[in-house]
Image (spheres, rainbow, N blue to C red):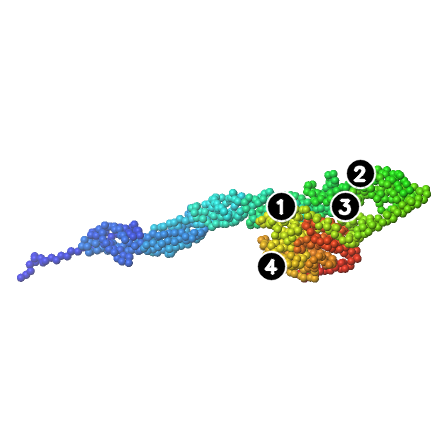
């Protein structure tokens, strides 16, 4: 059968979604460290929803019907690819996928800190942010219109920023950047001042006892203000200032202050490096400056310690400077009669900073005049002459009895208008230019000549007698001396009449009457008269017998007198010897030989007995003090208070005591120090005296034997310390009669050193005196040469055991000068002067006699009659030169 053309077959149908269109304008917005916000435009046509995928190292999916989506929980700083696909309603048919890639923002850094802040750099450190990042971008900006704007990058979590300006506030910002080098995390910033720079040229000026003025230069860079601190040992203070100077007040005088200057930034906490300087304020001026014990060559200055602090004192005078730690000082070696201005400065502990000086002006006492002599003695006048003194003087004050005074400028004066026969004491004192400072007074006593008698008359003339009468002379007299021809002796009477008997009849006699002053030697002018006795009328046997008997009696009396005085020589027995030889006064050297022979025959006991008690009434309070008794060797050889050597006081007021006395020589009233040999307990004081009195020469007159002669060996074999004085024996030369030692001494406090020479006379016997005079005279010449070279301005210490036999040496030195320069000898006077300064300067008559023997030998050597002594003196100088060679 044929197919029916109108009949249709079964229809097969299929349904399908066309692909949704592609989305448009896919964008990423609101990017954070953990999310992004995706937005896109609706595609053409239809769609059911959108499929969202994003991948980093893994894939995530989600869907939304919106045209936007907020993706969260992302990792910071990671690159993500976000894909959007439109999906049809069958939820399977998908359109073309549109993708976009983007980094999340890196996370913010943590713990940004600034370290190691300097004037031109800071060191930044921070903690790695969570998530990823590629590097960090750093920026820093200073104040003042973005001064020094800078930027850099780093992959580290620290960075040292340099090239900054001191004292400027900088803001430092750190931003983490993703690997696309554009996606940045949140910026973290921190502000910090760099340290201000150090101040320059800090100076201290206008220093006073209570203030200093500080100045400095502005530091490079910026700063806000300066912090100023100062402190001494006890207090601390601080202040701030905007200036580059500051006057600090209310400081303690003489104190050491440390001043600290620091520049501070505007944050008031960031400080630059400090500059430190130390300086002493000036000590305050000393108070109560006085001058005591002014002598011809020294003065003792005293003052009160100033307020505040001080270490020592500088005393300035002329071109000299002396340093002392005490509030007193004895200045020696001054010129007599000169004006000195002493300035005393308190000195701080740096030995540089000084206070304002306190000053005192004074004159030293003029020196004592020498060789005051009375010439041209008349009844109403005397003529005084003396030698010009050493040093300076303005005038001389001349005083005489009855408190009369005159000022003159010459070295001679004619004293007139005096009363005849009166004893006058004439005193000469040198006066300085201030017209008030006076030297030691020298006095001499002299009688004016009595006036001649008046109206001499002879009455009652007989064959064997005459009666003389006369009128009392003007002025004073003690007695009258009556002499007549044919009679060498004379009679004396205090009356104004006298009956002279036993004359020869019929003989012409010349009778002379002389008024004599109370010194029994100063005589007035003779008045004479001649007269014949009456002639006898006839021989008178009984008269002749009487005369013969009288003559016999007179001869018997004369024999008795001669026998009595045969052991005692008098002026009447030796009329050719000058009168002054019979008294204990100075005499010319040409008169001495006769005097010595006369005295040597009788001995010197009478003179020595008179000398033993000289000066003993003076006070000895210091030496008798209980605290000082142990410092004395002999209880009868104690220094007088007026002439004792005083040491400095270290603590106890008895520290100034030592058994030693100043003794005058020819050149100075303090030319020698006579001392006892040190005891074991007084060696420190002995060496302290050597140092403080500037001793360069020591003379030792005893053997070093404590058991026999009581003398301790006070010097070391090598080096030894005697408290603050270090002593070193540097050489020793032993010769036949003496030993010479050199010592180096050092003050351990000041480090000052000196060289001392000791002359040890070993030829002095255990008892008595040396047998010969030559050896001691030679020894003196050796010592004197050293003294002239090294000890011209300081005393020479002379000691034996107790310090009394030293008088022999000192007296010989004085006598040699007196003989050589003045052509005079005064043994008695020199010993008297020494005895007034220290007891028992001569212990025995033997020593006194020995001095006279030395003088006799010295004078004979000058006249060429003692060739042995001349040779010995020459040898002494050679010995000295040889000794110097040995020491070298």
Upstream in sequence: badge 3 or badge 4: 3
Q: Nearer the viewer, residue 264 or 769?
A: 769
Q: CA distance from mark 4 to mark 1?
A: 34 Å
The quarter in which the N terminus is drawn is bottom left
Q: Looking at the image, which residue sits at the far right?
A: 538
Q: Nearer the viewer, residue 250 or 563?
A: 563
x 87%, y 48%: residue? 552
Mark 1 or mark 2, whichever is nearer to me? 2
* Image location of residue 710, percent across then percent down: 64, 57
Pointer 1: what residue? 301
Upstream in sequence: badge 1 or badge 3: 1
In the rendering, which numbered label is found on residue 475?
A: 2
Mark 2 or mark 3, whichever is nearer to me? 2
In the visual, does 353 lie left or right of 537? left
The kind of secondary structure element at disc 3 is strand
Pointer 4: what residue? 719
Q: CA distance from mark 4 to mark 2?
A: 73 Å
Q: CA distance from mark 2 to mark 3?
A: 23 Å
Pointer 3: what residue? 373
Question: Does the rendering let one see residue 435?
Answer: yes
């Amino acid at each position: 059968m044929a197919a029916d053309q109108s009949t249709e077959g079964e229809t097969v149908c299929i349904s399908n979604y066309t692909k949704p269109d592609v989305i448009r304008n896919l964008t990423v917005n609101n990017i954070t460290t953990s999310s992004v916000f995706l937005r896109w435009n609706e595609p053409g046509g239809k769609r059911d929803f959108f499929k969202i995928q994003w991948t980093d190292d893994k894939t995530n999916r989600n869907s939304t019907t919106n045209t936007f989506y907020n993706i969260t929980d992302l990792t910071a700083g990671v690159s993500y690819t976000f894909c959007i696909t439109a999906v049809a309603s069958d939820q399977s048919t998908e359109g073309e996928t549109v993708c976009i890639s983007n980094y999340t923002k890196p996370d913010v850094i943590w713990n940004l800190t600034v370290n190691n802040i300097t004037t031109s750099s800071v060191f930044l450190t921070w903690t790695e942010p969570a998530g990823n990042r590629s590097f960090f971008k750093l920026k820093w900006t200073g104040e003042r219109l973005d001064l020094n704007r800078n930027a850099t990058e780093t992959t580290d979590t620290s960075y040292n920023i340099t090239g900054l300006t001191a004292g400027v506030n900088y803001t430092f910002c750190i931003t983490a950047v993703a690997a696309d080098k554009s996606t940045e995390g949140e910026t973290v910033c921190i502000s910090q001042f760099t340290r201000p720079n150090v101040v320059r040229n800090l100076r201290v000026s206008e220093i006073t006892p209570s203030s200093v003025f500080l100045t400095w230069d502005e530091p490079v860079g910026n700063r806000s203000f300066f912090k100023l601190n100062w402190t001494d040992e006890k207090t601390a203070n601080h202040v701030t200032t905007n200036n580059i100077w500051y006057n600090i007040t209310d400081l303690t005088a003489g104190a050491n202050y440390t001043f600290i200057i620091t520049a501070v930034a505007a944050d008031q906490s960031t400080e630059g490096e400090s500059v430190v300087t130390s300086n002493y304020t000036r000590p305050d001026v000393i108070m109560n400056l006085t001058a005591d014990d002014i002598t011809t060559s020294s003065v003792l200055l005293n003052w009160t310690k100033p307020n505040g602090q001080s270490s020592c004192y500088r005393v300035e005078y002329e071109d000299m400077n002396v340093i002392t730690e005490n509030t007193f000082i004895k200045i020696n070696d001054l010129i007599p009669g000169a004006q000195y201005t002493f300035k005393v400065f308190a000195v701080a502990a740096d030995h540089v900073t000084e206070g304002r000086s306190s000053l005192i002006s004074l004159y030293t006492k003029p020196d004592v005049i020498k060789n005051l002599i009375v010439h041209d003695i008349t009844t109403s006048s005397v003529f005084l002459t003396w030698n010009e003194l050493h040093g300076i003087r303005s005038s001389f004050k001349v005083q005489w009895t009855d408190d009369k005074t005159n000022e003159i400028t010459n070295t001679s004066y004619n004293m007139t208008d005096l009363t005849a026969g009166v004893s006058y004491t004439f005193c000469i004192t040198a006066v300085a230019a201030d017209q008030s400072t006076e030297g030691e007074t020298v006095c001499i006593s002299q009688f004016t000549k009595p006036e001649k008698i008046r109206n001499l008359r002879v009455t009652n003339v007989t064959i064997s007698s005459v009666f003389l009468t006369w009128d009392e002379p003007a002025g004073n007299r003690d007695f009258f001396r009556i002499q007549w021809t044919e009679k060498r002796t004379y009679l004396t009477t205090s009356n104004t009449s006298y009956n002279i008997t036993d004359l020869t009849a019929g003989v012409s006699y010349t009778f002379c009457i002389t008024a004599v002053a109370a010194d029994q030697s100063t005589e007035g002018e003779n008045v004479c008269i001649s007269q014949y006795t009456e002639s006898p009328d006839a021989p008178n046997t009984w008269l002749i017998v009487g005369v013969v008997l009288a003559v016999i009696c007179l001869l018997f009396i004369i024999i008795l007198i001669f026998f009595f005085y045969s052991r005692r020589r008098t002026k009447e027995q030796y009329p050719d010897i000058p009168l002054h030889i019979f008294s204990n006064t100075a005499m010319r050297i040409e008169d001495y030989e006769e005097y010595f022979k006369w005295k040597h025959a009788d001995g010197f006991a009478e003179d020595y007995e008179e000398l033993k008690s000289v000066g003993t009434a003076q006070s000895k309070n210091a030496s008798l003090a209980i605290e000082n008794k142990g410092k004395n060797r002999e209880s009868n050889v104690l220094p007088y208070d007026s002439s004792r050597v005083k040491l400095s006081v270290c603590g106890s007021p008895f520290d100034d005591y030592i058994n030693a006395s100043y003794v005058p020589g020819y050149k100075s009233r303090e030319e020698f120090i006579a001392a006892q040999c040190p005891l074991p307990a007084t060696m420190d004081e002995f060496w302290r005296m050597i140092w403080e009195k500037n001793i360069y020469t020591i003379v030792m007159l005893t053997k070093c034997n404590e058991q026999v002669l009581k003398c301790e060996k006070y010097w070391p074999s090598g080096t030894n310390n005697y408290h603050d004085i270090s002593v070193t024996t540097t050489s020793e030369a032993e010769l036949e009669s003496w030993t010479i030692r050199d010592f180096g001494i050092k003050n351990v406090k000041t480090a000052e050193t000196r060289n001392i020479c000791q002359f040890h006379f070993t030829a002095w016997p255990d008892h008595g005196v040396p047998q010969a005079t030559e050896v001691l005279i030679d020894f003196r010449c050796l010592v004197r040469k050293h003294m002239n070279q090294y000890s011209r301005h300081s005393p020479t210490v002379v000691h034996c055991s107790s310090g009394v036999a030293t008088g022999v040496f000192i007296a010989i030195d004085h006598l040699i000068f007196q003989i050589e320069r003045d052509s005079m000898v005064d043994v008695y006077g020199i010993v008297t002067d020494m005895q007034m300064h220290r007891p028992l300067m001569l212990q025995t008559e033997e020593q006194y006699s020995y001095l006279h023997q030395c003088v006799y030998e010295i004078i004979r050597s000058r006249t060429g009659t003692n060739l042995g002594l001349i040779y010995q003196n020459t040898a002494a100088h050679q010995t000295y030169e040889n000794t110097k060679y040995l020491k070298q």
